[in-house]
Image (spheres, helix red, strand yellow):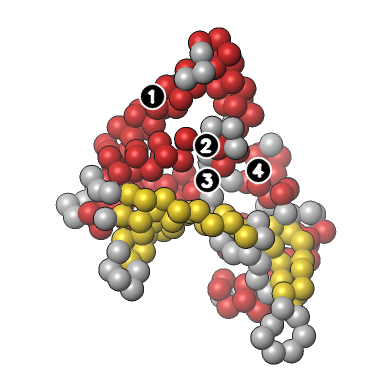
C-alpha cells in the first residue's frame, strides 16, 4: 500500500504539504504558504489537486473576527504514507500468541520486542548530556517516520514531540504498548519519561517529558 500511495504522490511539494498538515488540525493556504516558503497560488493549486485525489479535505474553521476560513486537513487515505509496522499482521500475531500460549503471552512478546529495539537505540544514540541524547534519539525517531522533534519548554523541561505513532492501531487492542514504549525510552535516555497524548480533528500529538 505504501508504494501504491507513493507513486500517486510524486511531487516533493506534496510531501511537504502532507507532512506539515500531519502536524496540525488543519491549515489555510496562507498558513501553508508561510510555513513552506511557497507562493500562495502554488500551494492552493497543490492542495486542490491533493483534494481531488482524496488525500485532503476542507472544513470551515471559525475565526475570532470575520467569516470562517477554509482549512485543509489530511484524510485517512494519507495514512499509508506513515509507518504502521504492519499493524494487521502484528495484531493477528499477538492474538494468536495469546490464544495459543495464554493471556499474558502477547505482553511478554511485546516486552521482548521493546527490550530488543531499546538495545538497538542505545547503540545509535549519541551525546554526553541528557539533552544531547534526547536530540539524537528524536532525530532517529524522525527518520523512522514518527515526525519527531526535541524541545525545551518555558520551564526548562526537555520534551520530545511526535505527531505519528507506529503503535496507534496496535494500542487499540494492547494498550500496555505505550507504557512499554515509555519505559524503553526512559532506559535508552537514562532518565524519567512520562508520556501524554492529545488527539483532535485527526491530529495525534504525543509528548514525552524527559527529566
The span from disc 1 to disc 2 (Cα, nearest Å) is: 16 Å
Q: Which residue is the site of mark 4?
A: 80
Tag of residue 205: none
Rendered residue at 34%/43% (across/down):
185
Query: Foreground mark, 3 or 2?
Result: 2
Whether tag 4 and tag 3 are in contact, CB under 8 A, the answer is no
**Front-most of 119 and 193?**
193
> Which is more N-terminal, label 4 or label 1?
4
Lateral position of residue 131 relative to residue 203, left or right: left
> Which is more N-terminal, label 3 or label 1?
1
Whether tag 2 and tag 4 are in contact, CB under 8 A, the answer is no
Callout 3: 10 Å neighbours few (<14), some, many (20+)?
many
Rendered residue at 28%/49% (across/down):
192
Q: Which residue is the site of mark 2?
A: 175
Q: Quadrant of residue 33?
A: bottom right
| On-image quarter of the C terminus | bottom left
Q: Which residue is the site of mark 3?
A: 165
The span from disc 3 to disc 2 (Cα, nearest Å) is: 13 Å
Q: Which residue is the site of mark 1?
A: 112
> Which is more N-terminal, label 3 or label 4?
4
Amino acid at each position: 500500500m505504501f508504494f501504491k500511495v507513493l507513486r500517486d504522490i510524486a511531487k516533493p511539494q506534496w510531501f511537504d504539504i502532507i507532512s506539515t498538515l500531519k502536524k496540525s488540525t488543519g491549515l489555510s493556504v496562507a498558513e501553508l504558504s508561510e510555513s513552506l516558503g511557497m507562493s500562495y497560488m502554488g500551494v492552493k493549486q497543490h492542495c486542490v489537486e491533493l483534494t481531488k485525489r482524496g488525500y485532503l479535505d476542507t472544513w470551515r474553521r471559525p475565526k475570532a473576527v470575520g467569516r470562517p476560513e477554509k482549512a485543509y486537513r489530511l484524510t485517512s487515505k494519507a495514512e499509508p504514507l506513515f509507518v504502521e509496522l504492519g499493524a494487521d499482521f502484528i495484531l493477528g500475531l499477538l492474538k494468536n500468541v495469546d490464544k495459543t500460549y495464554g493471556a499474558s503471552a502477547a505482553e511478554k512478546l511485546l516486552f521482548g520486542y521493546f527490550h530488543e529495539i531499546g538495545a538497538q537505540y542505545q547503540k545509535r544514540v549519541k551525546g554526553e548530556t541528557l539533552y544531547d541524547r534526547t536530540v539524537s534519539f528524536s532525530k532517529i525517531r524522525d527518520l523512522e517516520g514518527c515526525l519527531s522533534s526535541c524541545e525545551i519548554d518555558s520551564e526548562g523541561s526537555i520534551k520530545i514531540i511526535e505527531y505519528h505513532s507506529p503503535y496507534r492501531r496496535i494500542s487499540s487492542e494492547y494498550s500496555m504498548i505505550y507504557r512499554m514504549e515509555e519505559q524503553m525510552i526512559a532506559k535508552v535516555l537514562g532518565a524519567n519519561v512520562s508520556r501524554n497524548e492529545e488527539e483532535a480533528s485527526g491530529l495525534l500529538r504525543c509528548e514525552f517529558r524527559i527529566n
